[in-house]
């Protein structure tokens, strides 16, 4: 069964992370969860609370479910993977400093493997230097992460640019996974 790498760390967004974790196996792809260490991580719910008084201008963070990473980034062999799914939440803000994860990301993008990215996961693609000359989308508050590294931010639910498919937030999960699975199937024939 072809494997897809799902990097996580504390404070990755629950829906961004669990949707691909359960959806990809339905189409025959094994999801391998990796983290800075092989251990249990905390996910979070990120949303602007509806009807809050006073109104929130930014996302509020609340605890979500837990997820086990079965392998550390340092032990990942990127050549073993058919694709990469970069999840969102606050976690990528910290994960983008992990040298091993950046090397993995560069390898898979450079090898032409399908790479999906949602929300703040764009911070990892940007830090890895994979967005120069590329079109991508993300949550609007991360548009600068694309632009500062020479990419073009596009405000739409899903953007496909060669082997990279990006989405804004978990609200776009269905369209994102539809494109990512199409790409994975085409590349693993």
Image (cartoon, rainbow, N blue to C red):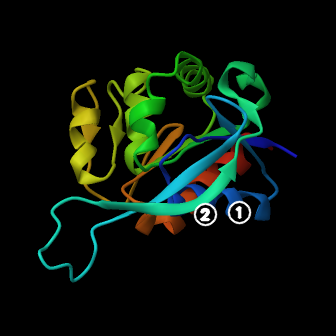
Viewport quadrant of the C terminus: top right
Q: Quadrant of residue 97?
A: top left
Secondary structure found at label 1: helix
Residue 84 x/y as whole percent? 62, 39
- Vertical comparison of 36 with 119: above or below: above
Q: Residue 22 carries which label?
A: 1
- Label 2: how many Cα within 10 Å (few below 14, some 14–19, many 20+): some
Q: Which residue is drawn at 66% across and 25% down?
A: 73
Label 1 CA crowd tier, 10 Å (few <14, some 14–19, many 20+): few
Which residue in the rendered view is the most extreme toward the right?
A: 1
Residue 82 percent coordinates (x, y): 73, 37
Q: Quadrant of residue 152?
A: top left
Residue at 61 percent of width and 23 percent of height? 104
Horizontal side of 122 relative to 105 (left or right) equals left
Where's residue 94, x and y in %?
43, 32
Observer-nearest of 61 and 111: 61
Q: Is residue 122 left or right of residue 25?
A: left
In percent of width and height, residue 103 lies at: 57, 17
Q: Which residue is drawn at 15% across and 62% down?
A: 57
Q: Name the residue under label 2.
A: 19
Would residue 41 be found to the left or right of residue 25 on screen? Answer: left
Residue at left offset 57%, top offset 51%:
42
Q: Residue furthest left?
A: 54
Q: Is mark 2 on a helix, strand or loop?
A: helix
The answer to whether 96 is drawn above or below residue 186 in the figure is above
Numbered-mark total: 2
- For residue 162, above or below residue 44: above
């Amino acid at each position: 069964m072809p494997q897809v790498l799902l990097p996580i760390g504390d404070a990755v967004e629950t829906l961004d992370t669990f949707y691909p974790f359960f959806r990809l196996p339905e189409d025959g792809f094994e999801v391998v969860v990796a983290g800075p260490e092989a251990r249990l991580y905390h996910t979070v719910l990120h949303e602007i609370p509806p009807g809050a008084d006073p109104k929130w201008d930014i996302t509020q963070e609340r605890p979500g479910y837990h997820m086990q990473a079965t392998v550390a980034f340092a032990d990942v062999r990127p050549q073993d993977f058919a694709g990469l799914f970069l999840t969102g939440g606050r976690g990528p803000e910290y994960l983008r400093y992990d040298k091993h994860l950046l090397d993995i990301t560069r390898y898979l993008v450079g090898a032409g493997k399908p790479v999906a990215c949602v929300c703040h996961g764009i911070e990892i693609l940007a830090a890895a230097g994979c967005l120069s000359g590329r079109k991508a989308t993300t949550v609007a508050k991360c548009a600068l992460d694309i632009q500062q590294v020479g990419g073009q931010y596009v405000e739409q639910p899903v953007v496909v640019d060669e082997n990279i498919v990006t989405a804004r937030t978990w609200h776009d999960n269905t369209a994102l996974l539809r494109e990512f699975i199409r790409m994975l199937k085409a590349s693993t024939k």
